Image: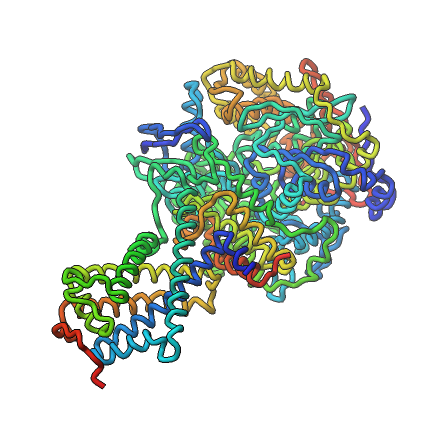
Amino acid sequence: MELQSRAPDGPIETAWDRHRQAIRLVNPANKRKYHVIVVGTGLAGASAAATLAQLGYNVSSFCFQDSPRRAHSIAAQGGINAAKNYQNDGDSVYRLFYDTVKGGDFRAREQNVYRLSQVSVDIIDHCTALGVPFAREYGGLLANRSFGGALVSRTFYARGQTGQQLLLGAYATMAEQIAVGKVKMHPRTELLDVVVIDGKAKGIVTRDLTTGRIERWAADAVVLATGGYGNVFYLSTNAKGCNVTATWRAYKRGAGFANPCFTQIHPTCIPVMGDHQSKLTLMSESLRNDGRVWVPKQPGDMRPARDIPDAERDYYLERIYPTFGNLVPRDVASRAAKRMIDSGHTVVKGGQGVFLDFRDAIKRLGRDVVADRYGNLFDMYAQITGESPYEHPMKIYPASHYTMGGLWVDYNLQTTVPGLYAIGEANFSDHGANRLGASALMQGLADGYFVLPYTIGDFLAGEKPGFSDTTHAAFADAENEVKAKVDRLLSVKGKQSADTFHRRLGKIVWDECGMARNAEGLGRALEQIPALRDEFWSDVSVPGTGADLNQSLERAGRVADFLEFAEVLCKDALTREESCGGHFREEHQTVEGEARRDDDAFSHGAVWMYRGQAQQPERVREELSFRYVKPSQRSYK
Amino acid sequence: MKVNLRIWRQKGPESAGSFQDFPNVEVVPEMSFLEMLDEVNRALEAKGQEAVTFDSDCREGICGSCGAVVNGDPHGPGKANTLCQLHLRSFQDGDTITIEPWRAKAFPVVRDLMVDRSAFDRIIQAGGYITARTGSAPDANSVPIGKERADEAMEAATCIGCGACVAACPNASAMLFTSAKVSHLGLLPQGQPQRFDRVQKMVDQMDAEGFGGCTNHSECEAACPKEIGVKFIARLNADLIKANLGNLRK
Amino acid sequence: MTAFFSLAKSTIGKKAIMAGSGLIMVGWIVLHMAGNLLVFAGQDHFNAYAEMIQSGFHIEPALLWAMRITLLACVGLHIWAAVGLSGRNRAARPVAYAGGRKNHATSYAAEFMLGAGVVLLLYLVFHLLHLTVGVFSDDVVQHAAFSKKDAYRNLVVGVGNPVVGAFYVLANLALGMHLHHGIKSAFQTLGLNDDRWNPLKDALTRWVPVFTTGAALLVALSCMFGVGVLIEAPDLSWTPSH
């Protein structure tokens, strides 16, 4: 199978302009004849739905939350990158492009990343016009902060709630379009299948989560903006509801799933406190500007931190990486913490964690300055742990945070199924093997506001508008499959909750396919996951009925998909015999324990194609070429 | 430690509800409140009994999904927290904890602790936006906004739409929510062209949804997880009066 | 007028009308209470004050009626808005919290607003009948017949009745509470909650109730206990001494 990226050749600076010139457009008067389904209402989905509606398309929007405003983009804290160069510090579209390709460890498509950098500036303009209250200087102009992986200050922010503010902006525009009837909103509705007719996506099958009704929706194109799959680890910084179901069902209908093993582990999260834990909370990366990471030199030393003298502390990041110190990139910091824990240096009794200590910062800057910089984060930490970071060092540990992998898309953001698009975290496109801080918001909004609304026209212009035949056999088949699965979940009547299985799956995936992976462990996981899946289908307990609001059923359906997806995730990790970005194979490291890429063998996107229940999925490649940013080994020593 | 739970169970909007008792639930102080409910549900599901329905998503206090009245307090005891940020260390061994949904005509109970807050969405749809076509915006720095004004707009914009203000209000009024939205946009220069039209439409929708009126108890401010102040309600009032008496609507 | 009606449609508009009418009444009450303190200046001064009001401030008798109609309209609008809003407020929570709802920020005054309003309405009616119209020309309530001409004696003797006096005391305590929350609310409702207005709001919220209730209690208790006021024998033939 040949993957057509459709990325324009020629000078990268003009690629997007030339592409827009080359693709087909839909006549403005005809746009209202087309109906587009957008699933998910995060930054990508909300901005796409709003913009498509502004252009004149009829949009149906779906989300599983009770309101589109609650999608998990809302939890993004730090900021959004844009190559505005307002700081006059040498930023440019090219530099943002360069940083992103390099930060992604040379596993992204150059043309996509360049386009992302180009439209980044438009995002800031548009969001400001929508009333997003970005932080400002006293003179009234926009403020910026610095973020990891960049030598310029290009991150726009709204306190620690940038994602919330950007999402509310997109949501408000969508609300306006809902009011005028251009967007039909379906909250508390979950996609359970994608309908493909004659090789093209023509609709979806959903379950109304309030009434349990299974419904068919026809459209001329389907856009998935359903986020990442970080909850495959069970414990992650994702929201409880984040799931792989939409992209997984699309995969099973023919959409290729690219690079699932590229998962990002964020180094500074609050550690697991006990078996009851339902999620992990991120502590902003900015804390590493003033906090010092350390563990006791003596393994098993459980004295209170303040009783451990400096001579008996190991400030391991400063020791191993003298140049970058505590500010090494996320993947490097995460793996270093893991190495410390593996060698017995945990600071959490019966658990895993390292110290992030502000003692010296408080001594140097004073408590007030520290409180001014990090007060709200310290309060949040104290609220969760009951310990004040002013008195005790924070305990932190890495946690699953973001997934770079996702549905494979071409330059138009179209999946391998014509008419089926994937945007935002749901696609695999722009971050390669590792995402830089403050780039997720940028990508979601770039896709939704500025890319998809143009590129979808290229497909629609070739389609007869107004497809509405939900009586087509493909709809009936999809609906029957969905109903059968619901019935099957309800009929097992076993002894364990779906959550219990999710937790067990998460442990397998985290242990064997988490921060560090090796062939042996992945092999183990590939044996354990199918066994767990079998156990799930023979012992899961889903009380209640399908014809009603039933959160147990919702959870079970999502876990069932994670149990299938996890296998492809591990397969991808096993077959990518190199270390790059968030994917670290212990067999492929330098003598110092750093990641070693293999550009000769793995400079490609690995795209998994479903070949039926009984068959192994096929691994196809999209070869990557780097004409502008030449691959080099990352070093932070 | 052990706690006794009294949880509101209700099949649907039209059904009668009642408390179900869960005596001697084993918990640990580090647990979050919702994790305790997870454990209750895990046990119920393992026995084949229907789980307690409640909304929750991000579990870090920003999505606004969760919320229940715990011992008479929306989001439970403590200031500036959502239900997901409440931990069992706020309770004592042997405590009885009463948990019930937001109560308001405009927030009908969907099931158990879950309520329908779509009224908030309709208030936004009525006018809680700035009309701007994608791609038509001028450079972001072309309109300077003083830091203090931008910060105040941000203060209002932090609203997470959880509905605790309505739950806490003796009149089940949505004035704090509506005023936060109106103020966020009304404070910014970009929001001026639609300012007075917006306030009228949003207030009309708020009234149409069946929320009560404000009688200035400030219970909303005390319950708000983002500590949004009633000063924004004053701003909303002023804008509405100006819109009418000054005939400033479109 | 269109603006008024469009405003009156919304809950906030009704509250603005409530606030406006309330503030006009607050102004009247303050003046009225100040006038009442003249009771301590003696019969002549007090009656002269009463006559001044009765005569339309010695300018035009119609002014008295203008004032009365304005105040009556304020009372009417205030009650109309209150009834509409409080009915709506109750309807907004048809199912009460089975486990109760805790208060953290409100005040007794705010919670007792409607109750105090009802007390004040009853009080107003009684007060007008008692000391303006003078329908209680019997010894049970008035001790002796009411005299149109001697407001001083009507007050001192009428309120001197312990039961009546006690009602005045209670009603004026309710008035103080009502004003305390009412003034604060009026500022908030009219959108006057910022650094410019808050000092005035805080001062009025505190001192207006203290003054009005203080003055009323002083007068009522003085009448009841005969301190500082002269209770003379009924003299139906009283005429000003000057």
Q: Residue furthest left?
A: C233
Residue at 34 percent across and 29 percent down: it is B25
Q: Is residue A603 visible?
A: no
Q: In which quarter of the image is residue B93?
A: top left
Q: In the image, residue B121 lies at what x, y percent?
A: 56, 42
**On the image, which quarter does residue A572 sit in?**
top right
Relative side of B223 to A623, left or right: left
For the point 34% across and 62% down, which residue is it?
Answer: C179
Its colouring scheme is rainbow
Pick the residue in front: B96 or A108: B96
List x then y, in percent, for residue A310.
Answer: 45, 50
In the rendered image, the residue lying farthest to the front is C237
Vertical placement of residue C242 versus B160, above or below: below
Q: In which quarter of the image is the N terminus of chain A?
A: top right
> What residue sits 80% from the left and 37% below the top?
A30
Q: Specify whether residue A465 is in view.
A: yes
Instruction: State left or right for residue A347 relative to residue A22.
Output: left
* Residue drawn at 48 percent across, 54 percent down: C12
Q: Could you tell me residue A231's position as x and y percent?
A: 56, 32
In the figure, C40 relative to A352: above or below?
Answer: below
Quarter of the view holding residue A471: top right
